[in-house]
Amino acid sequence: MDFQVNEISLIINNKKLEYELPYLWIRDNCPCNECRIEETLEKRFMLNSVPVDLKPKRVDIDKNNINICWPDNHKTTISFKDIEFLKRPRKPEKELWTNNFIPKYYNWDDFLQNNDIAISAISEFIIKGVICIKNAPCIPNTLEDLTPRLGPIREVLFERIHNVSIDGHIYNIAHTSLEVPPHNDFASYSWPPSVQALHMLINECEGGESMIIDGYAVLKDLKDDYPDFFDILSTFSVPFREFDEENETYANEPIIRLNAANEIIGFRYSNQLMQMIDPHKKNVSLFYKAYHELCNRINSEKYKSKFRLEAGHILLVFSHRVLHGREKFKPNGKRHLQDAYYEMDNIENNLVLYENLKR
Ligand SMILES: [Fe+2]
Ligand SMILES: [Zn+2]
């Protein structure tokens, strides 16, 4: 093992400059039983208990470990294996898609009862942002039964399990037979539900094909073609509101949400919920040009995938990424859909849990 001691850090494998380990990093991550809570492995050591210019008394590096003795004689050993492990991605990588995409179907019973099938379904869900479950009971509130796999239902104002039909409570476009353009639900929340299940209970009407769009694919292309449009859509906040006689929800947030590495981690798009933007704001005109281009792309055939949801089908979408909609239908029969929301964090964590069970 080739290493070099610097004023403030260790440099491991200097020639390739594999990585630097600041002394504060090493001290902070000491895995010993004094520095951790033994029962829970949580960190107990507090960084401010050492000076910011902390230096080791002695450094010893062998094939497997870094061993450090600190000025107070506290000893820290960290293995290279643990450091290498940090490079491994925790989740499968996303794959983008455009039109003519059909989600993978999983059987209701298998998804709920077989852990291996749940692992492949959840992995596929993380990768593509969408899967379908078939042969689900056509009984109202069946979505409650998905909670062992998907985690608790994320409630919002309005119903816990939403009923979508044209003869129930009408407070948005989905309760009519009009075309519902691609959108995600509850853009009017500062944290909209990240997963949505759409469960078809009865579908006797002509038309009304479901459509889905990979929002990240649209945004990636937009970024390549018009980086300034992408920038304004990720920095300019837009008001969204969903309400009825008894409920009022409102959020003022950008359409694109980025993480610290500038990767897209959220897409908020709802023509029907978007409100009037205060024209006193700077850059309204640039925003509108960018938004026009975005709307063009979302409503083009290039990105839309369409298929029919039959009774007993549950469409599951990662709604911070995938937009959903449906074509208009002829109200010549019964049509009843139920929606419920879940959170992606809970689903992804189940994947780690099931994989640990196999070890
Ligand atoms: Fe919706
Ligand atoms: Zn320690």
Image (cartoon, helix red, strand yellow):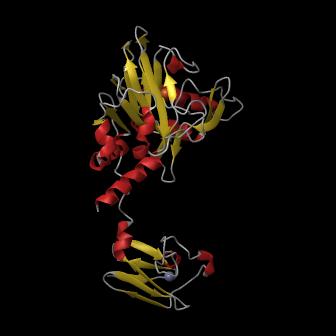
Is there any visible trace of residue 227 in the rendered image?
no
Choose top left, top right, bottom left or bottom right for residue 322: top left
Task: Give the x, y percent position of residue 166.
Answer: 50, 15
Q: Is residue 107 above or below residue 32?
A: above
Instruction: Say left or right for 337 vs 2.
Output: right
Q: Quadrant of the C terminus?
A: bottom left
On the picture, is 215 further left or further right than 158? Answer: left
Q: Quadrant of residue 286?
A: top right
Q: Residue at x 35, y 28 (%)?
A: 313
Q: How many marks?
A: 0
274 over 31 or under it: above or below: above
Q: Quadrant of residue 281?
A: top right
Q: Return the residue nearer the eye: 181 or 230.
A: 181
**Can residue 97 be spotted in the picture?**
yes
Residue 194 at x, y = what percent? 49, 41
Q: Position of residue 13 (x, y in %)?
A: 35, 77
**Relative to residue 57, is residue 334 drawn left or right?**
left
Of residues 257 and 354, the one nearer the viewer is 354
Q: Picture coordinates of residue 232 (x, y %)?
A: 56, 38
Residue at position x 48%, y 14% in the image: 178
